[in-house]
Amino acid sequence: MSTSLNHRDDLAVEAGFVCGRSAAIQSLNATVRQIAATDIPVLLFGESGTGKEVYGRLIHRLSKNCNGPLKKLSCRALDPGEFHAQLKSHLRANDDGSETGLPTLFLDGVDELDLECQKILLSFLPDGESGGNGHKPVRLIASTARNLDQESKAGRFRKELYFRINGVCFQLPPLRDRKDDIPAFLEHFLAKHAEELGLEAPALNESETTLLRMHDWPGNIRELENVARKIAALGQVRKALDGFRPVGGAESKFHPEPQQFSLKVAARAASRQTERELILKALEKTHWNRKQAARDLQISYKSLLYKIKQTGLDASKNEQGVKEGW
């Protein structure tokens, strides 16, 4: 059986969350396609809004079990009794034989389960060839916003359950690490929401796109879609982006007219942000060994110290945002 998407789905995926031009997403997609063809349990790890559920659906559609059902179970705010009942319902075997292929169970937010619910889940999961508790075996896909390796070491997540669901782990990159994909996302979301509203999709000029690229996108692709929806609804880019927060968090009025908003200024700001990100990555790689970082960046030690001070990295060294890799 072919595991390729049909042409219509290919177009949908290419325009949506999944595909992109950035190196990070291209590498991820190549591996996802390989793993999707197997029955290996998949753990999707990423910040809110990075597309974990979208990838879950994609993996199911690319699998040999694509003709079987995809059943989603939200793990958030469930007490043990309610979780047990929902899990039992989702894993109930289909006796009439109408379902073909191995069912796929998508556990949304598995990191939100308490220890008692984790125990219940573990008892239901297949161990080897048969399903847990006599239920039909499933292809398991789970999503998490927390690092479950760290959670298990801290005693907040059962190690046996972590090992059972973590056949292979995909870390979805945040939007700030794949900014080359922003223009394609904008085009897709503007067209999508303009069509829903019965309006013509507005076009963004280069300076407006540059401003959006300067934003840090803490809400990731979901936040970008919300901005695109607002632009499509208002039909006026200037009005929609008024008060938009670029990198640094300082609120500023946005005026796209050439005499009020300089493309050169925006380009310089984007260049400074890129330079800051490269320096930060070099410092993190060398554990803040500035001399080694300067050699890696092929600049003088004195120049690096100046740029660290100029970009404010030295002051933010101990902030949580700098410590975290993504």
Image (tube, grey):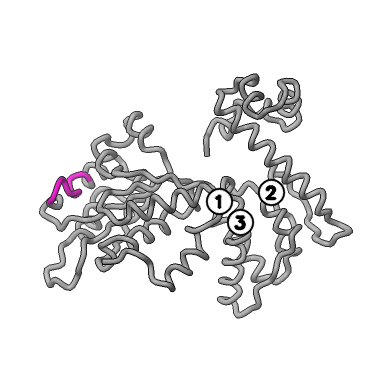
Q: Where is residue 315 shown, x and y percent of the image?
A: 68, 26
**What amino acid is found at the position of numbered circle 1 in the picture?**
Ser
> Disc 1 and disc 3: Cα gap in Å?
10 Å
Please tell me how crowded label 2 is: few (under 14), some (14-19), or many (20+) other residues with Cα within 10 Å: many
**What amino acid is found at the position of numbered circle 2 in the picture?**
Met
Taking the view exactly as shown, the residue that stands out farthest to the bottom is 198
Q: Is residue 278 left or right of residue 90?
A: right
Circle on res. 22: 1
Tell me if label 1 and label 3 are in contact, CB under 8 Å: no
Q: Give the SS element for disc 3.
A: helix
Q: In terms of sequence position, does the residue under pointer 3 or pointer 2 come before the other?
A: 3
Circle on res. 214: 2
Residue segment shown in magenta: 122-129
The image quadrant of residue 156 is top left
* Any part of residue 199 in sight: yes
Q: Where is residue 209 shown, x and y percent of the image?
A: 70, 58
Depth check, front residue: 64 or 141: 64
Q: Where is residue 305 shown, x and y percent of the image?
A: 72, 23
Q: In terms of sequence position, does the residue under pointer 1 or pointer 3 come before the other?
A: 1
